[in-house]
Image (spheres, rainbow, N blue to C red):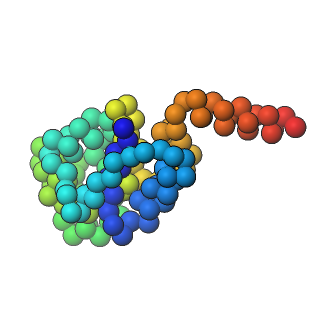
Amino acid sequence: MITIYTAPSCTSCKKAKLWLGQHDISYDERNIMSSPLSTDEVKHILEKCDDGIESLISNRNRFVKSLNVDFEELSLSEAVTIISENPQILRRPIIMDEKRLHIGYNEEEIRAFLPRSVRVLENDGLRLRDAI
């Protein structure tokens, strides 16, 4: 099952939910503003991040700037606590299942959440169109 972590005013979150709906992909949604992530949940997400905390934090975000914190200087537990206490600093949406994690909205990359059989059929269709 796919879980999508969102914020109500996030345009990228709305796009991701629309895309998932258009592709008949069911998901559980969690509003991280009204129900922030626990430190254990942040750690679980970080375990799947290729680039660690840097891929999870929105450095251009005004809330990140207002914290005046250099995440590279913090211990993992300090960073996880700050993230858990300040969900507005997270890049969104966060989309994950048992195997995959995607942060932000990118239509090409979110396709990884399509069932394999659907991806194969769509790729075959693209190849056929290109051949014609």
Looking at the picture, how far across and down is residue 79, in whole percent?
Answer: 17, 49
Q: Is residue 23 visible?
A: yes
Q: In the displayed structure, does residue 39 sit left or right of residue 30? A: left
Q: Give 123 or 103, whichever is nearer the viewer.
A: 123
Q: Give 31 or 51, whichever is nearer the viewer.
A: 31
Looking at the picture, how far across and down is residue 16, in whole percent?
Answer: 46, 55
Q: Quadrant of the N terminus?
A: top left
Which residue is found at the position 28% from the left and 54% from the top?
30
Question: In the figure, residue 51 lies in which quadrant?
Answer: top left
Q: Quadrant of the C terminus?
A: top right
- Toward the right, the furthest residue is 132
Looking at the picture, how far across and down is residue 121, in whole percent?
Answer: 66, 32
Question: In the figure, residue 128 lies in which quadrant?
Answer: top right
Which residue is found at the position 37% from the left and 31% from the top?
99
Q: In the displayed structure, does residue 81 sit left or right of residue 13? A: left
Q: Give 25 or 85, whichever is nearer the viewer.
A: 25
Counting every numbered tag in the picture gives 0
| Above or below, 84 relative to 42 | below
Q: Give 126 or 89, whichever is nearer the viewer.
A: 126
Looking at the picture, how far across and down is residue 41, in whole percent?
Answer: 20, 43
Q: Is residue 69 visible?
A: no
Which residue is found at the position 55% from the left and 52% from the top?
22
